[in-house]
Image (cartoon, rainbow, N blue to C red):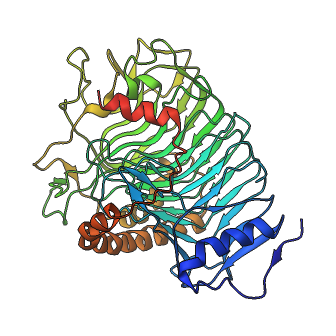
Amino acid sequence: MTRRDDSSCFDPSPVITITDRMNTALNSSGAGYILSLCPSTIYPIVAPLVFKFPDQEISTQGYPTGDERATLVIQGPVFNGTGHTTAIDGTGPNCDGAKIRHIQINGTRLGGTKLNGGANIEMGNNNADQLIEYVRSYDPRSWSCMHVTEGSKMCSNATVQNNDVGPCGLDGFNQWADGISYSCWNGLVQNNMINNPTDGGIVLFGAPGTLVRNNTIWIEKQTLLGGINLVDYGPFNGSFTGVVVENNTIFGGFADGTPTGNETKGDDEFDAIIKMGIAIGPRTWFGNHYGNNVSFSAIVRNNQFTGAFGYGIAMSGARNFTVEGNTLIGNTSFIGSRGPNCSSVDQTPTPAAFVMDQNTVTQSTTQSDFVNIQDGDTLTCIEPPTDGDYWPFGGNPGDTVSSSTSSSSSHSSTGRTVGLVLGILGGILFVAALSWFVRKRALTRMEQNRAARAQDADIYTQNYKHGSVEKRDANLAL
C-alpha cells in the first residue's frame, strides 16, 4: 500500500473546527491516508478522531520521539460522570492496518473523578495488523491509557511498542486506570515504558498467542494493584494459550532520600507499593467470583523485580502455566497487611516474593523458590504500611536500571542488548521528569477544570470499556 501524505502538516487553526476538519480528512481521503500533525503543536479536540479506511495513519510530521511530538488534548464536554474520554478510535469495521505513531495524547483528567467511557486510545475490534508506537499517552479521564479490544474475538496481530505511557489514574479506591489493556490474538507488546499506572501496568484479557517482552513498569507516588495481569476470565474463557511474558522489569516503591551508614530501608512519603508484580489467575484478583474457572496455558519467564511489593508473583486459579527464571534485582522488600476490603473468610498470606495457592494451581511448572500458601484469593485487598522504614533504598528507576545491568546476566537470561538498556535508562529519566511537571500543573488546574466541565450541557458519550474490566473493578468494590 502506497502511503499518501500532504506536503505540509495539518493546520490546527481555526481551533474551533479542528476536530471536524481532521475527521473529514480521515473520512474523505481513503486508504493509506496519513493525517500528519505539526511538530510541537497542540490540537484540542472535542470528540474522537475516527479511522475510516485501511492503513490510515495519524502521526507527527518527521516522526520525532520527544517533546516535539504533536499533542492531542481531550477537551470535549462531560456531564454526570460520562462524556468525551477517547482521542483516537480505530475500532471501526474497515480499519485493518491503522497506525498511531509519534504523537502525544493528554487525557486531561487533572485529578478529577474517573468517568465512564473509553480509553485515551481505542483500537482493535475485528481488525488486524494495527500499530501503536512512539506514542505518549497519559492522564486518561476513564479506565485506561490505551486499549486494544478483541471485538468478536477477531482482532489479531496488533503491535504496541516503544510507547511512553502514564501516569494513568489515581490510586484512590475505584479511581484506578490501566497503562496498556490488550486482548487481541497473536499480538506484540514490547519496549514500552509505563510510569505510574494504578490498576494494571499491562493487562492481558486472554490475548492468546501474544508476546509481552522488554517492557518497564514503575511507580513513584501511587500504589499500583498489579504490574502485569493475567487474571481476567473473559473474553477468552480463561485461555492464555501461547501467551509469553518475558524479560520485563518491574519497579516497586522506594524509600525517600539516600541511606546513611548501613541503612538498607527507609520511609516513603507516598507509601507506594505494587501489590502484585505479576498476577496469575482470576482468584488473585476476584476471589471466588469465577468459582473453579482458571487462567491457563501461558509462559511467564525471566522477568525482574526490584523495590517494594506485596507479592512479586502471585498465582491462584491457574492451570498449565510455566513460571521460571524470574528474579529479584537490587534492593527489594515485601510488605503489606490486611486492608479494610479484605474478606473476613480469606486468610491473607504473608507478603513474599513468589507465592502460589497450592489448592488452586494445577499442572504447572514453577521455579523452586515459590512459597505454597493456603489461600490466594483477592490479594489486591492488602494495604501498605502508612509509616516506618519498610521501603528499600534504590533511588529513582533510572538509577536502579543502571546499577543492575552489570549483574543482570547472573540473575536471568534477559536477552537485552546494551542499546536497549541505555534506551530504557534514558526513557525513564525523561518520562519521570515530564510526569512531575504534568502532575504539578494538573493539581493547580483541577478545581477550575471540574467547574468548567459541570457547565457543559451537551454530552458526547463513547463507552468502550470492556465488560471484564467492569467486573474486575466491581469485584474490588465488594
Q: Quadrant of the N terminus?
A: bottom right
Determine which quarter of the picture holds residue 131.
Answer: bottom right
Residue visible at 69% across and 78% down?
36
Work out which residue is located at the far front of the displayed protein and give it: 457
Residue 15 seen by the camera: yes
The x, y position of residue 279, in whole percent, is 44, 34
From the viewer's perspective, is residue 232 above or below residue 267? above
List x then y, in percent, for residue 476. 33, 31
Residue 64, placed above or below residue 435: below
Number of callouts: 0
Residue 369 visible in this rendered orientation of the protein: no
Q: Nearer the viewer, residue 457 or 21?
A: 457
Judging depth in this view, the residue of 160 and 279 nearest the camera is: 160
The residue drawn where x is 41% and y is 22% is 283
Decide which of 16, 409 is in the foreground and name it.
16
Q: Is residue 457 left or right of residue 324?
A: left
Viewed as shown, does residue 306 lie left or right of 23? left
Along the horizontal axis of the image, is 261 left or right of 343? Answer: left
User: Which quadrant of the rendered structure holds the C terminus?
Assistant: top left
Q: Position of residue 192 (x, y in %)?
A: 54, 58
Q: Residue 219, how many percent across, how many down?
A: 34, 55
**Name of the residue lying farthest toward the right:** 1
